[in-house]
Amino acid sequence: MAENHLIIFVKNPIAGQVKTRIAQTVGDGRAVEVYRHLLQYTQQITNPLPVHKVVYYGDFVNQADDWNNANYEKRQQLGQDLGERMLHAFREQFDAGADRVVIIGSDCLTLTTDHIERAFDALTVADVVIGPATDGGYYLLGTKQLYPFLFDNMPWSQPELCQLTKLAILQRDLTVELLDELTDIDEWADYQRAIQ
């Protein structure tokens, strides 16, 4: 049976460092509360998955937080920008014996357990799977081997990220499968819409 590894990228919930665009509207304290809600939601949807789960922390590994140590391996993100951090995480998981690796963040309240299962299923036929976000980025990326080009010189946090990622895949004659388009929680209005 193929070994599936799920990477979950999180930030440590520190005031002033998470959800800064939300903080501009409602302040740092509320922004941390929103981010804690997002983390709890991400735990809730990933917990049932029968895959190897690894939480990669932005600042420091917290062994005593809500991510259950029995169910989640914990590691540190390494690298200067998001691309380097993701590349390092993918490389670590493939080196650890993964056949398929999927990465998600902790910013999406419409992501479900089913989306993640479908991503792993998609990799039985496609080389790459992408979960496109409505802001032009993506909430999920998965591959069945390491493709460093996916993480190199990409316009992180820019509206053309998903489009340029797809283009880079197709230019190399690889196949890509797309999941449903979902909305990341970046602004206060996004959060309000999501919890209504």
Image: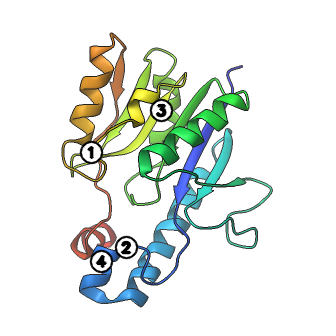
Instruction: Identify which residue is drawn at 24% across, 85% down.
Output: 25
Q: Within the image, what quadrant is residue 3 found in?
A: top right
Assess whether mark 1 and mark 3 are in contact (beta carbons under 8 angstroms). no
What is the crowding at mark 2: few (fewer than 14 residues within 10 Å), some, or many (at least 20)? many
* Residue picked out by circle 4: 22
Name the kind of residue labelled 3 in the image.
Gly
Residue 15, horizontal then vertical, whole percent: 46, 84
Direction from residue 161 to residue 116 in the image, left or right: right
Query: Given this view, does label 1 or label 2 mark the residue nearer the observer?
Result: 1
* Nearer to me, 83 or 128: 83
Q: Between disc 3 and disc 1, whose residue precedes?
A: 3
Instruction: Identify which residue is drawn at 40% across, 60% down.
Output: 107
User: Helix, strand, or loop for circle 3?
Assistant: strand
Assess whether mark 2 and mark 1 are in contact (beta carbons under 8 angstroms). no
User: Helix, strand, or loop for circle 2?
Assistant: loop
Query: Compared to 108, does 50 lie above or below?
Result: above
* Residue picked out by circle 1: 155
Query: Compared to 61, does 135 lie above or below?
Result: above
* Residue picked out by circle 2: 19
Give the position of the C terminus as an image quadrant: bottom left
* Nearer to me, 24 or 151: 151
Residue 1, horizontal then vertical, whole percent: 72, 19
Query: Can residue 102 be seen in this snapshot?
Result: yes
Compute the Cα span from label 3 to label 4: 28 Å
Query: Compared to 101, does 60 lie above or below?
Result: below
Assess whether mark 4 and mark 2 are in contact (beta carbons under 8 angstroms). yes
What is the crowding at mark 4: few (fewer than 14 residues within 10 Å), some, or many (at least 20)? many
* Nearer to me, 144 or 1: 144
* Residue picked out by circle 3: 142
Q: Between disc 3 and disc 4, whose residue precedes?
A: 4
Name the kind of residue labelled 1 in the image.
Pro
Q: Between disc 1 and disc 2, whose residue precedes?
A: 2
